[in-house]
Amino acid sequence: MYELPLLTLVIWLPIIGGIVVLASGDRGSDISKWIALAFAILTFAISLGLWTGFDVGSGQMQFVERAAWIPTFNVEYYLGVDGISMPLIILTTFITIFVIIAGWDVITYKPSQYMAAFLIMEGVMVGVFSALDAILFYVFWEAMLIPMFIIIGVWGGPNRVYATIKFFLYTFFGSVFMLVALIYMYFQADSFSILDFHDLELGMTAQILIFVAFLLAFAVKVPMFPVHTWLPDAHVEAPTGGSVILAAIMLKIGGYGFLRFSMPITPDASASLDWLIIALSLIAVVYIGFVALVQQDMKKLIAYSSIAHMGFVTLGFFIVFTIIRSPEVAGGAVMGIEGGMVQMISHGFISGALFLCVGVLYDRVHSREIADYGGVINTMPWFGAFVVFFAMSNAGLPGTSGFVGEFMVILATFRADFWWAFLAATTLILAAAFTLWMVKRVIFGEVKNEKVAGLQDLNRRETLNLGVLAAAVLALGIWPAPLMEVMHASVENLVAHVSECKLPASEAADCVLAVPASVAGLTGQP
Amino acid sequence: MPFDAANLFPILPEIAILVTASVVLVLDLYLEEKDKDINHTLTLIGLLVAIGLTGAVGGGEALILFDGNVVRDGLTDLLRGAILVVSLLAFVYARPWLKDRGLFVGEFYVLGLFAILGMLIMVSANSFLTIYLGLELQALSLYALVAFERDSKKGAEAAMKYFVLGALGSGMLLYGVSMIYGATGSIEFGPVAQAVAEQGMDNKVLVFGVVFLVIGVGFKFGAVPFHMWVPDIYEGAPTPAVLLLGSAPKIAAFALAIRMLVDGLEAIQADWQGMLMILAVLSMGLGNLVAIAQTNIKRMLAYSTISHVGFIFLGLLAGSAQGYASAMFYAIVYAVMSTGAFGILLILSRKGLDAENLDDLKGLNDRDSWYAAMMALVMFSMAGVPPTVGFMAKLLVLESVVRIDLVWLALVAVAFSIIGAFYYLRVVKLIYFDKPDPDMPVLTTSGGVRFAMSLNGLSLLVLGLFPAALLSWCQGVFV
């Protein structure tokens, strides 16, 4: 039966849309905006086909497309999704719609270039999530930098040039070493297929070096402490849409990288260096939580809150190795990764919504300083209600999506180590403290000044944006089962894979992880 | 040996260029000032004919001609084509600039065509003598082109520097050739290769010869530590001359290296590999670091050239068919990128104003968003950011280096390319993030220039997305 190449469509439709929007130009009418919106909605609609056609029982790659790209180097145009990448693709296509809508009236300088940059960005990000060829992945991964560089640099705040060059160089720095690692593995596997890399037998030294190369790339993207410093700058200077995409999707690409590359390709190195990632994650949760508390700038505060929340994600992923080593609690491993995944999706909604909220205020008052606001709820009651809701979910209130992921990660961590879990759980206090304190200062209290007194409540577009996101946060919080169901088989697959030692037979004695039956037979180990 | 007219058939492209150059030379004397466009048209037609002839005589078995002095093989075909196409673009970009300055005369075209002829001879040389002849023909024409703006002191100074240092480089090369002749008793690549394979590195004269050859190659490429002439000449020479000497000659220099080091001396590859490694690391390092400090964009591009030469050397030193193919891919791609970059500078230049400083690019997006996009493509490609072809070129040379287990060299290369990314990004920043000065004139360009620049810029994107064809062509040359 002939099937539509869904992934190709979802990648290239928005890119083509971007070119059309560019061509439509800025001739004083809204035509480019409408075209952009149409392409964004159409892409989202098509991407839903990935969800409905997805076989939840299978942990294998689905919707696979494979064609030669550079035959002499075995580089392929190789696409496919599993339960880990599919939800992230839907998240991408979903959030892009709101980014387009959010820029509708606000962007006055070359709006067609603005819309086009976001559409191209969307296609490229979907490409990152669906590429199964390492070079294809790398091409999308780096190509993503160009539109974001331009978005922050052209439509950003006063210090935008510094922020965007810092952003670009940081991420470029992280990823070039990954490129060398990928080329190295090509000569081991004679293929650039990521799935072949998963089965590749690698010695411990090679694994450690590759792990470090991956860590540089993904840790910058997540971002993990201590390479997080580009994020607050980029967020503060980026236009609202740029912040939303950065927080909601780009950070997730780092987390996705850990799941798709680091853990399955170098499980032994991951198992022996997991203490490092766990330590960095806990520092992100606790230390960055305190840093967020003292921020004066709303966007910076949410940026630091993102770093803390992403610390949860990496914690959930790498706690798995501790759990695997003590077989009696094996069930927790799947929970840790699923918790991290849910946290990623939920953070995508919540941080996106919070940045939109700051955008709403910024468009009216042109300030992001907390001190410039106070008593906003008196003039913007609807807006205030939304902000309180999203703040609550950012703090992890049960019933919202923020709670589900955090709770699962904390539970999994408890099975590994009480004190880690204790530290991780402080986020429930810290996140509540920094978010709610901000809400208190901005939304409640007396009307602070004339500007606040003259505020208009949300218009139709803003209400629609925040309303839909609020519904998503609530739905995921109350009934996360559909999401879990989609990813369950893939995560179980992944856990089974990372539980097995990948060292060559000669080094089998060093295995911390279980020795697979085939190798154990050769060396006579149990 | 009797003269065989069949020998002439495979060198028809060279003949076409020679004929064009001679016709323009004579015709120019009789042309009125207003008819000078005929020179331009004739040159373009000549180049197009040469491209067509390259296709017509290309393909098939390698042919050794003129008593073993000339060869026509896959390498010749591909490099001829690349040199001609790049030069064609260069002439198109140069025309408005020349007209604005009253320099729209036949000599520019004659000298340019002779330089191209020299390059074509280099790529089809099969002996040290032929390659030297080609090199000198190219170099002498380019010296004159650098001094082309007679009243420009900077131009005269640059030409002098170029001439002295270029002569020094040629001298080194010739000295090396003479030693190799002494050691092997031949100046044709085939017999030399045979003799070298028999003698190996035991012959000290041969070793010295190789050292001088590598120095000569380093001079012609502008690799550190033989790079001193590059920035000064790029800055001082009129931009159209820089356009001609900064793009296609890199392809010819690549041919020089391949013909001499690989065709002639591959048996002692282990020895020149080490030398090229030093040149490569120094070039990438110095080029990228010093480029950051430049405010003159021509000077910045000069240092950027030096760093790209380091990357080309990475592919060469790998010493495998794969490596040579990747170096060739890189050299061709670099020539296209550099043509695009200098082309934009020519487009931005107006009567009385040469776009030379980075600030002249300010706010290009507001002045002409299409040219801005093309320049951004060139810059991202030079920085090696996908999906542009610059990334593919870098990927391929890195791959050939990792293939021979020089992972550390690959790491050094990527580390310097991060540093390099900064100054290319700065150009993008100027184009997109800064506002133009209010007194900057509106950009007016002819349709031909716009078409050529679109072709130039978009080719970087298209080749980046579909590199397979050009790549397998390059690989087909070295099997």
Image (spheres, coloured by chain):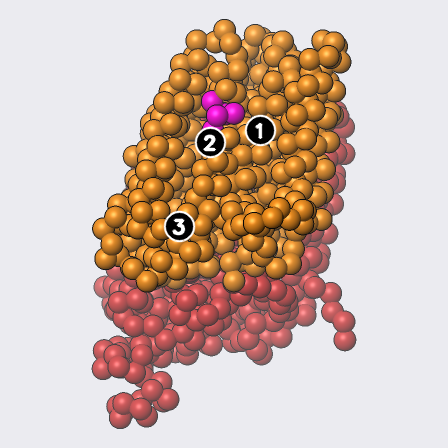
Check disc 1 and report the residue beneath it.
Answer: B114
Q: Secondary structure at mark 3?
A: loop
Spatial CA distance of label 1 from label 2 is 11 Å
Check disc 3 and report the residue beneath it.
Answer: B186
- Considering every residue shown, the one lying at the far front of the view is B2
Confirm whether the magenta stretch covers residue A34. no
The residue carrying pointer 2 sits among few (fewer than 14), some (14 to 19) or many (20 or more) residues within 10 Å by Cα, namely some
Relative to A415, residue B34 above or below = above
Q: Which residues are magenta?
A: B139-143
At x 65%, y 33%, the residue is: B17
Location of residue A336 (image quadrant)? bottom left
Q: Amino acid at mark 3?
A: Ser
At x 72%, y 37%, the residue is: B49
Residue A242: in sight, yes or no? no
Q: Looking at the picture, how far across and down is residue A291, in whole percent?
A: 30, 41
The first of marks 1 and 2 along the sequence is 1
The residue carrying pointer 1 sits among few (fewer than 14), some (14 to 19) or many (20 or more) residues within 10 Å by Cα, namely many
Q: Main secondary structure of the magenta part?
A: helix
The quarter of the picture where the C terminus of chain A appears is bottom left
Check disc 2 and report the residue beneath it.
Answer: B136
Relative to A483, residue B25 above or below = above
Q: Looking at the picture, how far across and down is residue A93, in whole percent?
A: 62, 52
Chain depicted in orange: B
